[in-house]
């Protein structure tokens, strides 16, 4: 157990954590959990034949993962899923396979270049590849597809927890800016029958909206939030997991563009992690390091959000905690 380790042993565990991440990514890409979901209790020979891989190397991978309590092995040597490994299967309703498939390749390399991000104050990905991560995705459809699957699987569970908490009692039309294919907006419309929805994102994102509600209740607009936004009848706006991808300068552009189309009395809800000012563990601090490797943005403290809001002509009126590590930050002009 971790509490039984010496300080040196704990540091060695931290130093080698990339091995476990790499092993999980390999298992996800190979689809081992999917095979065992369909047919439990398979030998290494059965698994290697189905996957067309070297049996000895596959055994070494699974032996390592079993030692970390991912997958199980019976007394006769057969492998099976355990509760942890089940999440690696696409068949699991809360699968994290998409989270792992997005990692190998350039993204993984960027994680290994955190030092460069610290030295130069720029995303490690940009420094390694001479282009932004979003630019890379626009040039690589397969990588973009994996990224979209990852974001969908990563956020669907939290959407079900967050949407019911939106304070929409007096709201008639909700505009989700940067809302992708509309998963969060769909959840909000499902929770609140009196609310209509507007989905706004790039044309490539909204060309296949996933909203399943009555089409009389929602509209779709394509465009960039760095350009003037369409005039609509929205009286509330959402930015969910958007600003943390962008620098303060770009975030101000987004906020000011929203401000220009907001009516008097309307509200803006920023849904992001709020970094604690103390040294406690918080998921936003983990996410912040991911952002430093891939994007020009960052996770922000309450003070940093207030400063950003003030510069854009907003005032934060309240911050609502949620069961996730994200908060709902309410702004008014």
Image: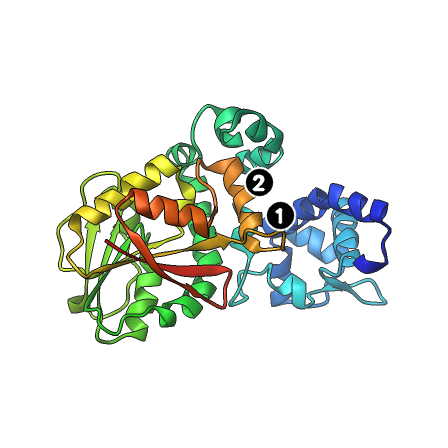
Tag 1 residue: 25
Q: Residue at x 62, y 30 (%)?
A: 115
Q: Residue 143 occupies which quadrant of the picture?
A: top left
Which quadrant would the N terminus be assigned to in this image?
A: bottom right
SS of the residue under disc 2: loop
Q: Residue at x 75, y 61 (%)?
A: 69
Residue at the spot x=28%, y=63% of the render? 211
Q: Is residue 295 left or right of residue 104?
A: left
Q: Is residue 130 left or right of residue 209?
A: right
43 in relation to 250, above or below: below
Question: Which of these two is toward me, 52 or 213?
Answer: 213
| Disc number for residue 81 | none
- The residue that label 2 is drawn on is 104
Can residue 258 be seen from the camera position used here?
A: yes
Q: Position of residue 12 (x, y in %)?
A: 80, 43
Seen from the viewer's position, the closer of residues 105 and 53 is 105
Q: Nearer the viewer, residue 62 or 282?
A: 282
Label 1 sits on a secondary structure element that is helix
Look at 71% across and 60% down and name the residue there: 70
**With respect to residue 261, does 66 lie above or below?**
below
Distance between the Cα atoms at labels 1 and 2? Answer: 7 Å
Q: Does residue 172 appear left or right of residue 330 in this picture?
A: left
Mark before the other along the chain sequence, 1 or 2: 1
Where is residue 247? Give x, y as percent: 40, 37
Q: Are marks 1 and 2 in contact (CB under 8 Å)?
A: yes
């Amino acid at each position: 157990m971790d509490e039984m380790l010496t300080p040196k042993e704990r540091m060695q565990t931290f130093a080698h954590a990339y091995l476990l991440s790499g092993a999980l990514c390999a298992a996800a890409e190979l689809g081992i959990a999917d095979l065992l979901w369909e047919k439990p209790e398979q030998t290494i020979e059965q698994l290697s034949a189905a996957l067309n891989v070297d049996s000895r190397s596959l055994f070494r991978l699974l032996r390592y993962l079993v030692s970390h309590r991912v997958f199980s092995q019976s007394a006769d040597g057969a492998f099976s899923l355990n509760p942890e490994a089940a999440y690696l299967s696409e068949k699991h309703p809360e699968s994290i396979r998409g989270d792992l498939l997005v990692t190998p390749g350039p993204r993984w390399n960027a994680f290994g270049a955190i030092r460069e991000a610290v030295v130069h104050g720029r995303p490690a990905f940009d420094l390694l590849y001479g282009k932004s991560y979003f630019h890379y995705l626009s040039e690589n459809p397969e990588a973009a597809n994996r990224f979209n699957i990852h974001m969908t699987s990563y956020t669907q569970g939290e959407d079900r927890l967050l949407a019911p908490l939106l304070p929409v009692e007096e709201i008639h039309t909700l505009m989700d800016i940067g809302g992708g294919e509309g998963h969060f907006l769909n959840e909000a419309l499902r929770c609140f029958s009196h609310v209509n929805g507007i989905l706004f994102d790039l044309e490539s994102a909204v060309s296949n909206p996933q909203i399943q509600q009555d089409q009389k209740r929602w509209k779709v607009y394509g465009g960039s939030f760095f350009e003037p936004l369409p005039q609509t009848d929205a009286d509330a706006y959402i930015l969910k997991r958007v600003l943390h991808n962008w620098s303060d300068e770009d975030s101000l552009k987004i906020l000011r563009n929203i401000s220009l189309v907001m009516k008097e009395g309307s509200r803006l809800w920023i849904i992001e992690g709020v970094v604690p000012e103390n040294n406690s563990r918080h998921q936003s601090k983990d996410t912040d390091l991911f952002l430093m490797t891939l994007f020009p943005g960052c996770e922000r403290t309450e003070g940093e959000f207030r400063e950003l809001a003030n510069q854009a002509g907003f005032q934060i009126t309240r911050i609502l905690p949620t069961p996730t590590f994200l908060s709902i930050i309410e702004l008014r002009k």
